[in-house]
Amino acid sequence: MKSNPHDWLNEHGNYLYRFALTRLRDPHQAEDVVQETLLAAIKNPNYAAQSSPRTWLTGILKHKIIDCMRKQVREIPASELLTEEDANMDEFFDETGHWAEKPQAWDVPHDALQQKQFLQVLQQCMARLPQKLAAIFTMRDVDEMENEEICKALNITATNAWVMLYRARMGLRKCLEMHW
Amino acid sequence: MLNCKQTSVLVSQSLDRPLTWRERWAVRLHLAICIYCRRFTQQLKWIRDAMQVWQQQVTNDSEIALSQAARERITQQLDKFY
């Protein structure tokens, strides 16, 4: 099957954009990785063996997204990468290790409207997370990447990864508790 | 006996790696007596599930699309190479 890059853009551009948007959340970055993906696809158009151009393009896109996230994390000096000791979490626990603010019971969304509102608050809370934490949390909880893959992609240790994921979840949970 | 802080660390890690049986046992013991850490555990799972739902909804939402400007920019780039 012969198809050209303009067809790819027309048929799959919006899908690729939405896929990227859920990972990067920034519309401009999402547009950029879609463009990079299509350009990479032109340079290496050996998808003949693939059943679907969309699957093939999405595969390229995933790599471009990880490159983008890697840059986000790399721009942080190594000294700021979190280690186990840094995660002292004073804001969340008192000196005896008890919750400073006890987790409240949440109303689980019951209908579609409530669920939509919950998802909106969740995204607002994601936007408040430091970018590196949002990036690693997305890799783990949206893309379900294995820890090993994440560490390799971001060039961090397993301990770094666990601490960053813990930070991300604590931050998100607290934000949701305040706003949901 | 674990305190809440230690428990929360292990509960988070349980979403990322298999805990040792010793850790699992310690967490279970704490959760049995602590409603707050039980809530915390449940909420982390809700957050994970909600992220998945959100991702699928956005990816399938045909109203979200590349802007006209972005589309034109990308078309120009493609023209250079094709």
Image: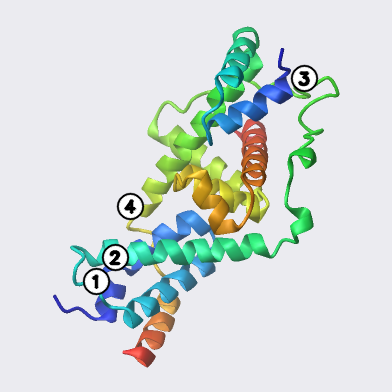
User: Along the horizontal axis of the image, is B46 left or right of B4?
Assistant: left
Q: Residue at label 3?
A: A98
Query: Which numbered disc flags the more N-terminal residue, 2 or 3?
Result: 2
The crowding category of the residue bearing disc 2, from other C-alpha atoms within 10 Å (few below 14, some 14 to 19, many at least 20), is some
* SS for callout 1: loop
Marks 4 and 3: in contact by CB < 8 Å?
no
Return the residue at label 1.
Answer: A47
State which quadrant residue A78 falls in. bottom right
Q: Do tags 2 and 3 sit on the same chain? A: yes
Q: Earlier in the sequence, mark 3 or mark 1?
A: 1
Q: Amino acid at mark 2?
A: Trp
Tell me the chain of label 3.
A
What is the three-letter code of the residue carrying label 4? Asn
A51 to the left or right of A95 = left
Please, what is the three-letter code of the amino acid marked with disc 3?
A: His
Question: Relative to A33, is B8 on the left or the right?
Answer: right
Circle 4 residue: B60
